[in-house]
Amino acid sequence: MNKIISICNQKGGVGKTTTVINLATYLALRRHKTLLVDIDPQSNATDGIGIDSKELNKTIYDFLISSDLATETIIKEITIRTQVKDLFLIPSNTQLSGAEIELINLPQREFCLKRGLENIKNDYEYIFIDCPPSLNLLTINALTACDSVIIPIQCEYYALEGLTRLLKTIKEVKDNLNSNLDIEGIVLTMADFRTNLTKQVIKEVQNFFKKETYKTIVPRCIRLSEAPGFGKPIALFSKRSQGAKAYLRLSNEFLRRNR
């Protein structure tokens, strides 16, 4: 089975990159060959997995603006092995922030990423795309290229703010660019179970999205916040922490759904 999944939420600070790094890592540790594609100009996924984005000569930017999208050459050149066996990375850096302007003038600009990933899709079991926290052309490229979307939602007051707009964008992409696009699931993150607010948000999301919401809820965890600073996924940084246990459970739940 080969599957491309975008991790998407235009609201920042919801645990999007934390989720993509750690879910991809646990799948790779289970010997599922996995690729992480960073198309966020902030390059948090790249740095968080242990690759210094400032030292890179070639990134996803070089591929997206290439006139030779039909071949595997460039996309294989920019793919990096990570410190986790079976986990690979197509990195990003701040140079990508100019890509959207350059993409505007290209024919079929929404399909640039899709054409590249189609050439390597069969090399991996799972490909995860870390989207920028906005509904821009890079995000549209990710939604056009993927089979499904995972939406992280933090357990805070404005949890559902902007979700309507995101779901509308997903529907528009499905109707016009990618008829196979589905919602893979919704992940509740940053839960503080001591507060009534967290319980309220969990109940509200589960009521609105009964089938889509994962049972695993990721708690607030200092170790999850610290791990990116050391360039390590939580499984390598603090595997006994509550955050690590949550993402291990989420990976198991993800695999059960996909089987």
Image (tube, rainbow, N blue to C red):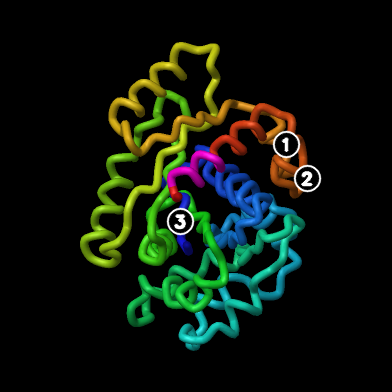
Q: Nearer the viewer, residue 125 or 6?
A: 125
Q: Are marks 1 and 3 in contact (CB under 8 Å)?
A: no
Element class at badge 1: helix
Q: Is 150 drawn above or below residue 153 in the view shown?
A: below
Residue drawn at x 46%, y 40% as measured from the top left: 152
Residue 98 lies left or right of residue 81; in this view the side is left
Q: Marks 1 and 3, Cα distance to the nearest angstrom?
A: 26 Å
Whether the magenta-drawn stretch holds residue 252 is answered as yes
Residue drawn at x 77%, y 40% as measured from the top left: 237
**What span is in magenta?**
251-257
Q: Position of residue 238 (x, y in %)?
A: 76, 35
Amino acid type of the residue that numbered disc 1 sits on in the rendered structure? Glu
Which mark is drawn over residue 14? none
Residue 250 lies left or right of residue 6; in this view the side is right
Q: Earlier in the sequence, mark 3 or mark 2?
A: 3
Task: Mark 2: give few (<14), some (14-19) or many (20+) Cα within 10 Å.
Answer: few
Q: Position of residue 5 (x, y in %)?
A: 45, 56
Give the residue number, with chain letter if any, for mark 3. 5
Q: Are marks 3 and 2 in contact (CB under 8 Å)?
A: no
Q: Nearer the viewer, mark 1 or mark 3?
A: 3
Element class at badge 2: helix
Q: Are marks 1 and 2 in contact (CB under 8 Å)?
A: yes
Secondary structure character of the magenta stretch overall: helix
Residue 191 lies left or right of residue 143; in this view the side is right
Q: Nearer the viewer, mark 3 or mark 2?
A: 3
Give the residue number, with chain letter if any, for mark 1. 226
Q: Marks 1 and 2, Cα distance to the nearest angstrom?
A: 7 Å
Q: Position of residue 71 (x, y in %)?
A: 51, 86
Q: Marks 3 and 2, Cα distance to the nearest angstrom?
A: 26 Å
Amino acid type of the residue that numbered disc 2 sits on in the rendered structure? Phe
Give the residue number, with chain letter if any, for mark 2. 230
Q: How many marks?
A: 3
